[in-house]
Amino acid sequence: MTEEQLKSLIKLAILELMNEHRDLFRELLREALRDQGPEAADAAPQGDDDAQRAEDAAKREEILKLIGTTI
């Protein structure tokens, strides 16, 4: 299987999950975002500053609003 075929298959699987199992997708996304929350910022590489962490948090909040859920 080529890399492009694999990417296409993964995209298809994600779209199917989003359409047919919306609640499961929300929970998976919520967990992934939670894992990348404030605790993950402590493990960020040197040089990351407060502005970058605030931007990342804003992006997480925007994604959560789009899927209609909260952490």
Image (cartoon, rainbow, N blue to C red):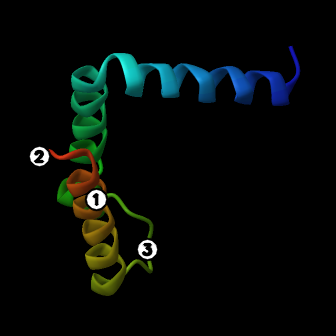
In the picture, residue 37 is in which quadrant?
bottom left
Q: Which residue is mark 1?
A: 60
Q: Earlier in the sequence, mark 3 or mark 2?
A: 3
44 or 61, nearer to the observer: 61
Give the residue at mark 2: 71
What's under tag 2, amino acid-wise? Ile
Residue count near mark 2 (Cα–Cα under 10 Å), binned few <14, some 14–19, many ≥20 = few
Farthest front residue? 19
**Kind of residue at badge 3:** Gln
Disc 1 + disc 3, Cβ < 8 Å: no
Q: Which mark is residue 46?
A: 3
Q: In the picture provided, is 52 more to the left or to the right than 26?
A: right
Rendering quarter of residue 40: bottom left
Indicate the secondary structure of the residue bearing disc 1. Answer: helix
> Relative to 57, does residue 39 appear above or below in the rendering?
above
State if disc 1 and disc 2 touch (CB < 8 Å): yes
As helix, strand or loop, the secondary structure at mark 3 comes to loop
Classify mark 1: residues with Cα within 10 Å, few (<14), some (14-19) or many (20+).
many
Q: Is residue 49 left or right of residue 58?
A: right
- Pick the front one: 15 or 28: 15
Q: Earlier in the sequence, mark 1 or mark 3?
A: 3
Q: Nearer the viewer, residue 21 or 37?
A: 21
- Which part of the image, by quadrant, shows the N terminus? top right
> Label 1 sits on what residue type?
Arg
Q: CA distance from mark 3 to mark 2?
A: 27 Å
Q: Is residue 14 above or below residue 38?
A: above
